[in-house]
Image (cartoon, rainbow, N blue to C red):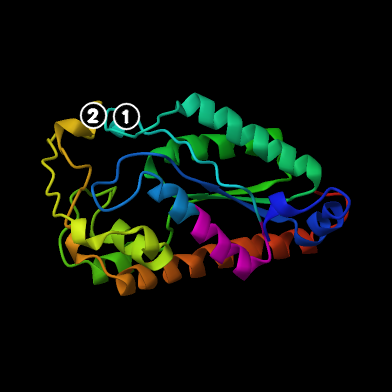
Amino acid sequence: MNFELENSYEVQEKIRSKRSVILPVGAVEAHGPHLPLGTDNLLAARLADKLAERTDSFVLPVLPYGQVWSLRNFPGSINVSNEALIRLLADIGESLYKQGFRVFVMVNGHLGNAVALKEAARVLYDRVPGLKVFYFFYPGTKEITAEVRETPAAHASYMHADEIETSYMLYLAEEYVDMSRAIDGAPHIPDDADCTPTPWEEMTSSAVLGDATLATKEKGRRIIERSLDVMAEMVLQAKREHAESPAGTE
């Protein structure tokens, strides 16, 4: 359910009933010639909608800006600091708790946000221990991704506008993908890229870290549906635990 379309006369009882809320978190950044700047926002928002259907949760408006330091010099990229993102997410979480939510799910569409989301969850763990906080970035997909991938990953930890992320878009937001412009990015990632700050213009001119031409909707479906299974089970379990908790222990 779309939280921003509710009204204050009716929403309180619905919060008490659902108790879980999902915040899609994305970014505005370069994604090569075939994907839009808001790719991460689209992925996060549409994944959140699917997760909400499985878990009977509210969905908040997408948080559209993220930490994109690595791509900040590419045309169209908008960067915010980890510090700003942590503070905003923690404040949102605390406000949601005061409204009556007890399960707060951050669905992340941009790997660069991962540090901030994890730290915000830690802040909330200390500040409002009665709030269960999840930070999801396609959990449970390692094996299925390796199974469907036709080319080796350009990097062990991240993918970007490549075969995999483009497949996500073909499944979740196909109308925004122009496969006629997809390329094989083939980045040159230096050995020390994980050990020292490395702007991505030093390793790619396109912001595509792999062969986007190999993306398919079916690959995206298999990976996304697997991740939805994993996320939904975690959220539903948290809701069950909340429902079973003795009164006064929240």
Q: Which residue is mark 1?
A: 72
Whether the magenta-drawn stretch holds residue 55 is answered as yes
| Residue 123 visible, this angle | no
**Quadrant assignment, res 81:** top left
Q: CA distance from mark 2 to mark 1?
A: 8 Å
**Picture disc at residue 199:** 2
Which quadrant does the N terminus fall into? bottom right
Using the image as rendered, state which of residue 19 and residue 34 is in the foreground: 34
Counting from the top left corner in percent of width and height, residue 17 is at 81, 61
Q: Nearer the viewer, mark 2 or mark 1?
A: 1
Disc 2, disc 1: CB below 8 Å?
A: yes
Above or below for 216 versus 86: below
| Main secondary structure type of the part rendered in magenta | helix
Amino acid identity at mark 2 = Pro
The residue closer to the viewer here, 180 or 222, is 180
Position of residue 158 measured from the top left corner of the image (x, y, whole percent):
29, 48
| Magenta-drawn segment | 45-58
